[in-house]
């Protein structure tokens, strides 16, 4: 059984969240850091852009505001389309023990999300590839075979990957309580309507998904928040 690190929920700005994910991948690849699972939220609200999308997104995104503040535009190190980070929960998995191509690794990692959400009352399965995906700036507009949809086909979890040989960073957004008006102003469409039990708290969701990850990855988690020294190193790398 592998020992994994679990980093408790962090809420900071999107640029720092992406720097943390990249740092964890680098530490795992180069400094014998253990595989890691973490969950986080974005403050302030942001739109994250896939690595190949950084120059190709709707111009009005640069002028959108939420609660009187401009939305952050944040570059992800991974691929995919634009994701609005408001009312969502993001997960990140950093590992190197999974074999297979990019699609196979996606499917292996996503098993903990399928199992965990099933226990929370939401049945999910993989989406089907759609040719129009690359034409849409909205990650949640169309599903690919790397994304998870409910039984009505509504996309609920959009994920993307950065691979460096056998070392993988996969992170993704779970659309929990989107602000409908904001979502519509960003993407000119309504958010997917996935029915989530109202009684679920963020703590309930994280606890259940972490228990599912323990089973799916056959691992034991050691709870270890980012230390002040680690955070300072990440901030130094970000500058």
Image (cartoon, grey):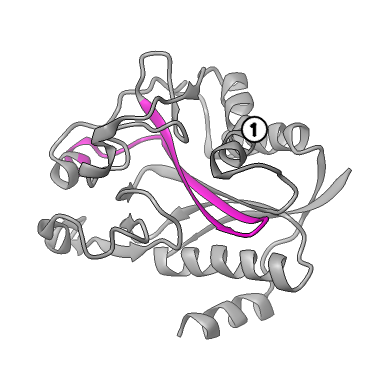
Q: Which residues are magenta?
A: 155-183
Check the image and report above or below for 58 versus 201.
below
Establish if 115 lies above or below 219. above
| x and y percentages locating residue 45 in the rendered image | 32, 56
Give the class, few, some or many, for how many residues have Cα within 10 Å of label 1's Cα (few <14, many ≥20).
many
> Residue 200 or 218: which is nearer the viewer?
218
Within the magenta stretch, is there residue 176?
yes
Q: Is 24 placed left or right of 122 in the picture?
A: right
Task: Where is residue 57? Give x, y as percent.
Answer: 19, 56
Closer to the camera in the image, 156 or 145 = 145
Residue 236 position within the rendered picture, expressed as x and y whole percent measured from the top left:
54, 85
- Residue on which disc 1 sits: 112
**Relative to 160, is 186 on the left or the right?**
left
Viewport quadrant of the C terminus: bottom left
Q: Secondary structure at mark 1?
A: helix
Q: Is residue 115 above or below residue 225?
A: above
Image vertical order of residue 63 relative to residue 219, above or below: below
Magenta span: helix, strand or loop, mainly? strand
Q: Quadrant of residue 66?
A: bottom left
């Amino acid at each position: 059984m592998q020992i994994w690190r679990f980093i408790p929920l962090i809420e900071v700005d999107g640029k720092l969240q992406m720097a943390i994910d990249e740092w964890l991948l680098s530490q795992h690849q180069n400094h014998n850091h253990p595989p890691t699972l973490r969950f986080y939220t974005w403050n302030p609200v942001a739109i994250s852009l896939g690595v190949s999308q950084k120059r190709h997104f709707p111009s009005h995104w640069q002028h959108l505001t939420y609660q009187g503040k401009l939305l952050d535009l944040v570059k992800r190190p991974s691929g995919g389309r634009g994701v609005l980070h408001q009312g969502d929960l993001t997960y990140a998995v950093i590992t190197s023990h999974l074999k297979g191509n990019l699609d196979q690794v996606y499917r292996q990692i996503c098993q903990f999300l399928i199992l965990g959400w099933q226990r929370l009352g939401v049945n999910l399965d993989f989406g089907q590839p759609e040719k129009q995906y690359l034409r849409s700036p909205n990650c949640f507009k169309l599903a690919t075979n790397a994304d998870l949809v409910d039984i009505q086909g509504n996309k609920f979890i959009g994920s993307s990957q950065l691979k460096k040989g056998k070392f993988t960073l996969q992170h993704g957004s779970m659309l929990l309580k989107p602000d409908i008006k904001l979502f519509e102003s960003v993407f000119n469409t309504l958010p997917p309507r996935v029915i989530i039990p109202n009684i679920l708290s963020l703590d309930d969701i994280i606890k259940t998904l972490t228990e599912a990850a323990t089973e799916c990855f056959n691992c034991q988690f050691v709870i270890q928040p980012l230390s002040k020294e680690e955070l300072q190193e990440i901030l130094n790398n970000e500058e």
